[in-house]
Image (tube, rainbow, N blue to C red):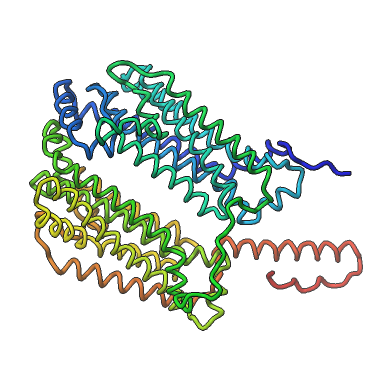
Amino acid sequence: MTRQKTGFEGTAELVRLAFRRDIVMLPACAVGIAALLALTARDLRVLYPSAATRRAVAAHAGANPALRLLLGQLDGSSIGAFLAARWSVWGAVLAVLLTVFVVVRHTRADEEAGRFELVGAAAVGRRAPLTAALFPVVAANLVIAGLTCWWLPAQKLPWAGTAALALSIGECGLVFAGVAALGAQLAETARGARGIAIGTLGAAFVLRGVGDAGPQGLSWLSWASPLGWVEQVRAFGSAGERWWVPALPLAAFAGLVAASFALAARRDGSAALLPARPGRPSASALLRGPLGLAWRLQRGSLAAWLAGYAFVFAAFGAAASGIGSILGASVPLRRYLLRIGHQAVVVDAFMSALMLLAILGTAAYATAAVLRLRTEETGNLAEPVLATAAGRIRWGLSHLSVAMVGGGLLVVVAGLSAGLGYGLLTGAVATEVPSVLAAALAKLPAALVLAALAIALVGLLPWESVAVAWTAVALAAVLAVFGPALGWPAWLTDISPVTQTPRLPGGTVAAQPLLWLCGIAVGLSVVGLIGLRRRDIGDFGPARLVFIVRAWLLEYVRESQGLSRSGSGASPAKPPGPP
């Protein structure tokens, strides 16, 4: 009788496979997070060189609830305290996002794709896949902590504060590794598992923010959040570090992992503990065409983006009320903000830079929404849609329409939220909301151009569309954010469509650049849709062609060798056609 595999058999092989799959992404992200902390520490010495300057900034920042909500409490006036206030929470958020995506990729995503059925048919125990998924994220968080402990002392920061900051960020990532592992047992899809983990992260951020920015009686809420535990370590604090606090995330990680293993042992393979919601007896009228289907597929993602935009830009808008006094203590930072915002007034420059971030985020959303076409194509989901009366043009237009309308909604929400956040504190809602909203809408054509570029790539260069489209978004962001501040030549920064938009609020509006951007967006969209209509669906590009040619040659060689061994003297048969 065959013994049922319920242990950790095959864990080592699965761990090696997981590291091999993430051999580029995992080290790059881990090193990038640690490097971001080190570079920030270096920049803080340049921006706030004297203790008096840092004390003045600390006084203004501590009196601004919006800044406490976004960044957390500032405990002290040293460079280390400034670094901890700026990056303890956000560095932990980056580590958490990396952790969540890696864990879900190696658990629920593999189950959804059917890979676990192949793995489970071999000599692999039921606990091995989950164990193998946890090894890469534990290693990544150890790398983040280790590099932080190596690089920050090189910036002349104390060892004790460095170790406390690195430990708290790495352990926060581990807590959400447990949350993601638990979500993978509960949800039926990878998207659902990521939604559980990221929703938990959002709740943790809100709890921590209310505890930091709210009344004194609500400060206990910070202790209910893993992100609050990162702050409560008090790295580089004026009263010293709290070395007992790191025991809390370790205990939470152990408990969540134990619960995940217990649930994984009780459920069926590829099943979920939270049952899928039964569908309606009849399909909605919206699903009669590809546009309704595209909306149905992308509405959850758009709702999450809209909620995030409303929260973040309202908080940043409220922070603008004290930005002048904070930036007044740092001449380089003030000069940088004025350059990137292309304004002469600090508040206008801050709002302009804020809308720049909003449009870059909108471009990222619109590009991802358009590239859903390529995802459906490579996942063999395009054929069922195109087998109906829907043509390729309607199919492409459906996702393009959702991307552009969703991008417009994001821009409107960003402008309204930032204008309300600033206007409510200054008592000028009637003037600030229209001004900031106009600044946001004026930048919308830049995001539409990048979305149209994505559809053009899907139609003309499908096998490279994802990489090239995201490279274009990254290039546009780098040129718009760093080009003006570093004095790059105009011909270089003008490559980005973002730099062609009006510089509002505080500037003038010219219709010609906006018309050109809209025309380019329309032209690229038409070209992409024509290319999508003419090319083969399921075109996987050069890699697929190489595979077909290689298989054809191997089959030809095998048949030729078989004929030569037989000694029949017959001429070799004609090689078979491509598979």
Q: Residue furthest front?
A: 217
Residue at 33% in and 52% down: 475
Residue 12: x %, y % from top left: 68, 36
Residue at 77% in and 41% down: 5
Task: In this rendered view, identify the residue nearer to me: 471 or 382.
Answer: 382
- Could you tell me which quadrant the N terminus lies in? top right
Q: With 187 as the anchor, is 438 left or right in this view?
A: left
Which picture quadrant has residue 301? bottom left
Residue 288: x %, y % from top left: 48, 79
Which picture quadrant has residue 572? bottom right
Residue 331: x %, y % from top left: 13, 33
Q: With 350 as the anchor, is 305 left or right in this view?
A: right
Residue at 44% in and 73% down: 292
Tell how many labels: 0
Q: With 198 as the anchor, is 426 left or right in this view?
A: left
- Asked if 410 appears above or below 182 in the picture, the reply is below
Task: In this rendered view, identify the residue nearer to me: 216 or 58.
Answer: 216
Residue 30: x %, y % from top left: 45, 36
- Asked if 417 appears above or below 577 in the picture, the reply is above
- Could you tell me which quadrant the C terminus lies in? bottom right
Residue at 19% in and 27% down: 58
Q: With 461 as the anchor, is 159 left or right in this view?
A: left
- Asked if 511 appears above or below 254 in the picture, the reply is below
Task: In this rendered view, identify the residue nearer to me: 179 or 19.
Answer: 179
